[in-house]
Amino acid sequence: MSDVQTVKAVAKYIRMSPHKVRRVLNQIRGRSYQEALMILEFLPYDAGGPVWQVVHSVAANAKNNYSLDKKKLIIEEVYADEGPKLKRIRPRAQGRAYSILKPTCHITVVVKGTS
């Protein structure tokens, strides 16, 4: 009887809009670990970098902490939550100031593997 194990990794405070990261996450949801890495390698989006790191990290967690085979991992859940916004000020004419919000996000990847 094969026992299904879930493993999780989170990257916090990534300086990128969660909306832009979700566009990449939607591409890899439900795919195998190796397939996801190949897709992320060749996506034209900047969000591919941090997402690739988290996927790589969750596989390392699965291998080292749960002794699962990386080849058998399947991405079960991926999501990007909103983090705190960095608030900056843009000076405007006549003493006014416009606010600039620089978004951050937390990327979570959950994989399942059979031991």
Image (cartoon, rainbow, N blue to C red):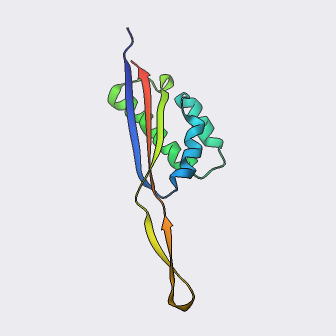
- Residue at screen point 59% across, 45% down: 23
Q: Position of residue 27 (x, y in %)?
A: 60, 37
Foreground pick, 20 / 40: 20
Foreground pick, 71 / 24: 24
Most extreme residue toward the top is 1
Q: Quadrant of residue 67?
A: top left
- Residue at screen point 57% across, 47% down: 48
- Residue at screen point 57% across, 88% down: 93
Q: Position of residue 6 (x, y in %)?
A: 38, 27
What quarter of the picture does the C terminus occupy? top left
Seen in the picture, residue 56 relative to 3 is either above or below; the reply is below
- Residue at screen point 41% across, 35% down: 60
Q: Quadrant of residue 7?
A: top left
Foreground pick, 81 / 53: 81
Most extreme residue toward the left is 65
Left or right, residue 94 beside residue 13 = right
Q: Position of residue 80 (x, y in %)?
A: 47, 46
Foreground pick, 103 / 38: 103
Seen in the picture, residue 71 relative to 14 is either above or below; the reply is above
